[in-house]
Image (spheres, grey):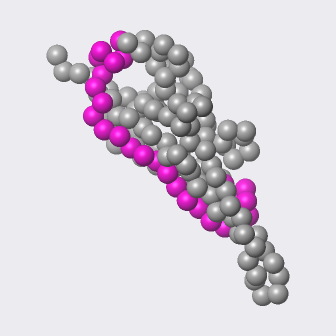
Amino acid sequence: MIAKRYGKSVQSVNPEFDAVAMNEIGFRRDQAWSIETETFQATYERVGEHLLTGNTEGDTQQEVESALLAALLADLRAVEADAADGDVLLVENESGVDYPRLHSTQRTVVVGFENRLHFTYTVDPPIRIGVYRPKRA
C-alpha cells in the first residue's frame, strides 16, 4: 500500500502521474486506509528507502515527458509489488519543501539541413519512498 502524510494523519493514496497536469507527479487520496500520524509512528518502523528518479530524451516534448512519468510509475509499482504483506510505502517528500518535479532542457540539433529540437527531462529531487513495517511486539 502507498500512503502519504496529510496534516495529522497518514492516508492511502493512488499515484497520478500525468504529463498534461499542472503538477505532473501527484498522489490522490483514495479513502481506503487512514491512521493518525502519532499512532503510525508508534506502530510502524522504517525498514528501508527507495529513491525513484529518471531521465529521458527525445524529439517530441510530450512523448519524452510521458515516457519519464510512465517509467517512474512502473518503478513505483515494482517497489509496491516487492513489498511484504503489511508493509506501508510512505511518500516522504513534503509539498513546498522537497516535492519532486520534472525539469526540462531543450537544445537545437542539426539533422541533415534542418534544425530540430531535442528535449531532456529529469526528476529532481527524487521521489523518496520509505518502507515501513509493523513493529514486533
Residue 103 visible in the snapshot: yes
| Vertical relation: 43 (above or below) 23 | above
In the picture as drawn, the residue positioned furthest to the front comes out as 97
Give the camera-side residue of 21 and 78. 21
What's the magenta region?
Answer: 39-65
Which image quadrant is residue 89 in?
top left
User: Is residue 8 shown above or below 110?
Assistant: above
Quadrant in which the N terminus appears: top left
Question: 130 or 31, which is in the foreground?
Answer: 130
Front residue of 136 and 92: 92
- Give the x, y percent position of residue 57: 62, 65
Percent position (x, y) of residue 70? 58, 51
What residue is at 49 percent from the left and 42 percent from the top? 127
Position of residue 110 relative to residue 137, above or below, is: below
Asked if residue 81 can be seen in this view, the reply is no
The residue shown at (48%, 13%) is: 8
Which residue occupies 62% across, 49% down?
A: 102
- Point out the image quarter for the C terminus: top left
Q: Check residue 40 for magenta coloring.
A: yes
Above or below — where is 53 with respect to 115? above
